[in-house]
Image: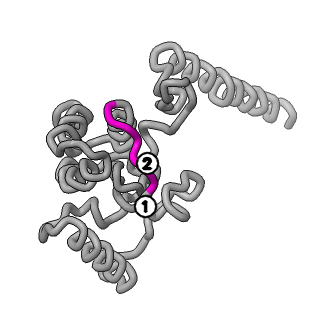
Amino acid sequence: MLNHIRPAVVMIALFTGVLGVAYPFAVTGVAQAAFHDQADGSLVRDKAGRVVGSALIGQSFAQPGYLHPRPSAAGDGYDASASSGSNLGPLNPDLIARVKTDADAFRAETGVKVIPADAVTTSASGLDPHTSPPYAELQVARIARARGVGEAQVREVIRQHEEGRTFGVLGQPRVNVLLTNMALDARFPRPTEG
């Protein structure tokens, strides 16, 4: 009986060594060598070299002088340890009430009737680092007013950070919120709390 068990034990040890140790080390090594920034989480650093976030994970910006991201249902908002959507179906009264409240507030702020979906709906992860160009455009006046600059100047910074479809066909055009806000801070004085 031991003659039958030994080959199985050897195979399990071999597969564990190859698939559980060697393969992960090889993939990590290739990723670090070929895609160092992405393998380390696409971290974004300020001028002093401090990590201020990741280009792949959304975070909250509530001040009027900043581009605001889409709402988040992750924990208390943008909590990467609680990444998740609200899991409320489209007919759920709680979701309908929240979206209606957010839409009414956004209409009162901007005066627009048609609101981009990402202005009032959360992403599946709750950590989307991007916003749509139409949603970013609707925020231009507020950002310009808070920073004391012209709308054309703010619009230019946003357009410089607009990303096209991945490989030209996948997804939708988008604006990275963190990178755009850092560019706004670099080009214009940081807005005061408000």
Identity, as a three-letter code, of the amino acid under mark 2: Gly
The amino acid marked with disc number 1 is: Ser
The residue that appears at 14% across and 40% down in the rendered structure is: 152
How many tags in the picture? 2
Q: Secondary structure at mark 1?
A: loop
Looking at the image, the residue that sits furthest to the right is 2
Q: Is residue 125 visible?
A: no
Q: Quadrant of residue 91?
A: bottom left
Determine if the magenta segment contains residue 58. no
Which of the 4 image quarters holds residue 62?
Answer: bottom left
Instruction: Please give the name of the residue rendered at 76% of the width and 26% of the height, measured from the top-left corner.
Output: 10
| Mark 2 surroundings: few (<14), some (14-19) or many (≥20) residues within 10 A | many
Q: Nearer the viewer, residue 41 or 153?
A: 153
Cα–Cα span, label 2 and label 1: 9 Å
Q: Residue 109, labelled with which disc?
A: none
In front: 156, or 14? 156
Residue 8, how many percent across, how many down?
A: 74, 33
Q: Colour mode?
A: one colour
Q: Relative to 183, is 59 on the left or the right?
A: right
Q: Are marks 2 and 1 in contact (CB under 8 Å)?
A: yes
x, y (%) of residue 150?
18, 43
The residue identified by callout 2 is: 58
Q: Main secondary structure of the magenta part?
A: loop
Q: Specify few, some or many for label 1: CA neighbours under 10 Å numbering under 14, 14-19, or 20 or more.
A: many
The answer to which of 47 and 188 lies nearer the viewer is 188
Label 1, on which residue? 72
Magenta-highlighted residues: 187-193
**Residue reaching furthest top?**
33
The residue shown at (25%, 77%) is: 104
Judging depth in this view, the residue of 88 and 51 nearest the camera is 51
Say whether residue 191 is magenta: yes
